[in-house]
Image (spheres, rainbow, N blue to C red):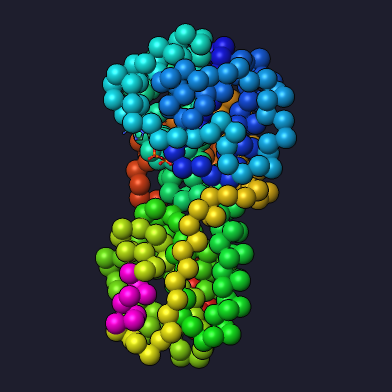
Amino acid sequence: VKCIGILTSGGDAPGMNAAIRAVTRAAIYNGLQVKGIYRGYKGLVTGEIKEFKSQNVSNIIQLGGTILKTARCKEFTTPEGRQQAYDNMKKEGIDALVVIGGDGSLTGARIFAQEFDVPCIGLPGTIDNDLYGTDTTIGYDTALNTILDAVDKIRDTATSHERLFFVEVMGRDAGFLALNGAIASGAEAAIIPEFSTEVDQLEEFIKNGFRKSKNSSIVLVAESELTGGAMHYAERVKNEYPQYDVRVTILGHLQRGGSPTAHDRILASRLGAAAIDAIMEGQRNVMIGIEHDEVVYVPFTKAIKNDKPIKKELVNVLRALSI
Ligand code: ADP
């Protein structure tokens, strides 16, 4: 391998810039040439590619978003689109690819690597933390801290008015942000997709906790078709328990932004450097993760299995501490 291409794809996450910087610098440090590919797979298909020197990634470690931009790319899901992407890679002399993104992006990388003889290395970049084989993903910690800031503020007004607040957080079909956000902010409950069909989480919360000893409550709800979202629960409470004063806050895209936390910057830096180590070692088609503070290589198929488990212990902690 002489030249690597780097791209960010799918949903953006704080810390992606720190990862771009780490991959670029580690590659140059190891004598490789680096090309930045803009707008995810789109830039590979259209040829929006530029050589990156060390200065191209100066002063970006602290920035949210991604300087390479990101996009969702329909063409790349077709064999013709991927052929075009491959042709552009060859034209640019790129002989390995580092893809920073979520499970969709890594699925694309897996398929692309299968079709063409191109080493692809994935880095877990998503605030949802839903990739298997890594303790956390780039952006997750920052999003969690953003949620804390917001919930702390909501609590001020919730306690003043004796209200029941449903706060909707992101996470797609994973409850990590909702559950850990609830524990960290001292919220009374979290409604998460992992348990949505097993138990009536609202019923449980109302029966066990709400108004036993408190005059206001905050419930974090993971946005997901499986939970139905915060609005769904607010409507239910309005119908079933009209005595409660219910409010809804949907945090939305503010969870995607902001300067990455120390945790996410360090994670992104370690993963970025490890991606280049992996390429130098001849690894291909793996996602780099960190588990128990060690760098690990996770086959794409395992990383995107989509069943990263939620620890039951965390559910119990929240339950015990919210009485
Ligand atoms: P994320 O990476 O955040 O999960 P998406 O699911 O939107 O985001 O995926 C990002 C991009 O990855 C898609 O726009 C597409 O270009 C590519 N991709 C996703 N799934 C596939 C697939 N099955 N085959 C090829 N490319 C895919």
Task: Give whichever of 284, 138 is nearer the camera.
Answer: 138
Q: Give the image location of residue 129, x and y in percent.
A: 47, 50
Q: Is residue 31 above or below residue 204?
A: above
Task: Give whichever of 306, 277 is nearer the camera.
Answer: 306
Task: Give whichever of 250, 55 is nearer the camera.
Answer: 250
Q: Give the image location of residue 188, x and y in percent.
A: 49, 77
Q: Give the image location of residue 292, x and y in percent.
A: 56, 48
The mark total stands at: 0
Residue at the location (38% across, 31% down)? 73
Residue 23 image-quadrant placement: top right
Q: Which residues are magenta?
A: 232-239
Residue at the location (50% across, 20% down)? 48
Q: Can residue 146 be seen here?
A: yes
Q: Is residue 124 left or right of residue 24?
A: left
Q: Can residue 317 be seen here?
A: no
Residue at the location (51% across, 14% down)? 94
Task: Give whichever of 301, 227 is nearer the camera.
Answer: 227
Dividing the image into four equal quarters, which quarter contains ligand 1? Answer: top left
Residue 275 image-quadrant placement: top right
Q: Is residue 184 above or below residue 60?
A: below
Q: Is residue 205 above or below residue 113?
A: below
